[in-house]
Amino acid sequence: MRIVRTVEELRALLKPERLAERTIGLVPTMGAFHAGHRSLMERAVVANDVAVVSLFVNPTQFGPSEDLGAYPRDEARDAEIAAAAGVDLLFAPPVEEVYPDGFATTVRVGGVSEPLEGAHRPGHFDGVATVVAKLLNMVGPDVAYFGQKDAQQALVIRRLVRDLNIPARIEICPIVRERDGLAMSSRNVYLGAEDRARAVALRRALTAAEQAVAAGERDAAAVSAIARTALAQHAVEPEYVALVGADTLAPIERIDGEDVLLAVAARVGPARLIDNVILSTTDGAPQTA
């Protein structure tokens, strides 16, 4: 595996691959790799001739009071994980390579960026959309891989690619979880033993809601209340518990026919955690996706 620092070198290495019509897969990351990241890398390696992983802690998607300075960083460890997964290129640029002096452009995706995370983290998705647009232009992949844990981010990126006619396919991969159900996240390292035990509340809230839908509950407010009760049992106060259209993020009143995203965000000790599940009913039969 080769570690690359500049766009010029990256493009020089990828140019012959592209001329040879070899497929290129990209996994954009902020490092602090875990099994969820590795699953994305392995998918990119298997499905493409060339697998590229970007490692860049993007400052523009952090708010003034968020954890940019404390965000976990260990490039040497991350490089070992990427190499073991079979990655060909690790693109790890410095901040000045991505945002050079005089940088003055922001990409904003309206609509799906505004509720949920957008409401609680103003400007977050502007930073995400800008850096992802830059990475897609830098690498020029045939396909880019993202995780379902960041469900709203996935919608924002799909809309970005569609609206700007970026010639890359976006593939959203399943959430990878710890044995007790906690969604894998780089921020899980912030959790001490007590908070780690409480953090499973997010998954248990989603499971309780799934079970209610499976038992026939269709009222969104009732399902939300069930999820909130499960969180309260672990002394976790959510920032939001939302049932929204899976493709639009518009609030829904009943779970009936269309896929519904049940999303939850909560601060557990020092960590802000998110999780979600997609609920769907087909011909009246409840399913989970």
Image (cartoon, rainbow, N blue to C red):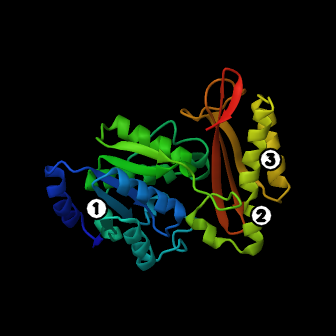
- Is any atom of residue 221 visible in this view? yes
At label 1, which amino acid type do we have?
Gly
**Viewer-nearest of labels 2 and 3?**
2
On screen, residue 202 versus residue 1, left or right, reads right
The picture quadrant where one finds residue 262 is top right
Identified at 34% across, 69% down, the residue is 92
- Give the foreground label among 2 and 1: 2
- Residue 141 or 20: which is nearer the viewer? 20
Can you name the residue that lies furthest to the top here? Answer: 283
Q: Which residue is mark 2?
A: 198
Mark yes or no: residue 65 visible: no
Question: SS at mark 2?
Answer: helix
The reply, left or right, for residue 224 in relation to residue 24 is: right
Q: Earlier in the sequence, mark 1 or mark 3?
A: 1
Disc number at residue 130?
Answer: none
The alpha-carbon separation of the residues under discs 1 and 3 comes to 46 Å
Residue that label 3 marks:
228
Question: Residue 91 at x, y = what percent?
Answer: 32, 66
Going by the numbered disc 2, the residue's amino acid type is: Arg
Residue at image position (49%, 45%) is 154
- Check contact, mark 2 vs mark 3: CB within 8 A: no
Q: Residue furthest front?
A: 46
Cα separation between marks 2 and 3: 14 Å
- Please state which of the two labelled residues, at mark 1 or mark 3, is closer to the viewer: 3
